Amino acid sequence: MDFIQSPELPAPAGHYSQAVVTRGGLVFVSGVLPARELADASFEAQCASVFDQCQKILRTAGCGLNDVVQCTAYLADVELWPAFNTAYAGVFGEHRPARAVVPVPGLHYGFLVEVQLVAERPHG
């Protein structure tokens, strides 16, 4: 397996990799929070930051958003679900990976959204 660290992003503060690629080409992206300076930013800005970081991690792993097969999103308030769905549709367009949206009582640093992805690296 390969451990992924995007040169475009800071290294994780904890003991984990941004993503892990299996020998079979599955890419498991760890939970991604918005950039730290966005703790007080709008939910939409936090979503944009998360998806931008996800794209950078996926690119380093040799794939992109169209290769995502599953997404798990954690939202700090169930009322954010419609806004998340709008942001998600704007990023993925016609591509529709399997998805779970999980309302949680709170996220690290007071953020409102965290996203975890599974992708399949294209063959060849």
Image: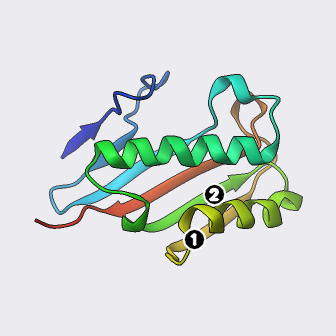
Q: Spatial distance from mark 1 to mark 2, Cα to Cα?
A: 8 Å
User: Which amino acid does the dot numbered 2 rest on?
Assistant: Ala
* Residue at 62% across, 40% down: 49
Residue 24 % position (x, y): 17, 63
Residue 22 % position (x, y): 22, 54
Q: Is 123 left or right of 106, judged from the image as shown?
A: left
* Residue at 46% across, 26% down: 12
Extreme left residue here?
A: 124
**Label 2, on which residue?**
73
Is 102 situated above or below 8? below
Nearer to the camera, 8 or 28: 8
Residue 57 % position (x, y): 39, 42
Where residue 122 sits, quadrant-wise, is: bottom left
Residue 96 % position (x, y): 52, 77
**Label 1, on which residue?**
99
User: Which amino acid does the dot numbered 1 rest on?
Assistant: Arg
Neighbour tally class for label 2: few under 14, some 14-19, many 20 plus, Cα within 10 Å: many
| Quarter of the image where the C terminus is located | bottom left
Is 87 situated above or below 2? below
Is 41 situated above or below 88? above
Neighbour tally class for label 1: few under 14, some 14-19, many 20 plus, Cα within 10 Å: few
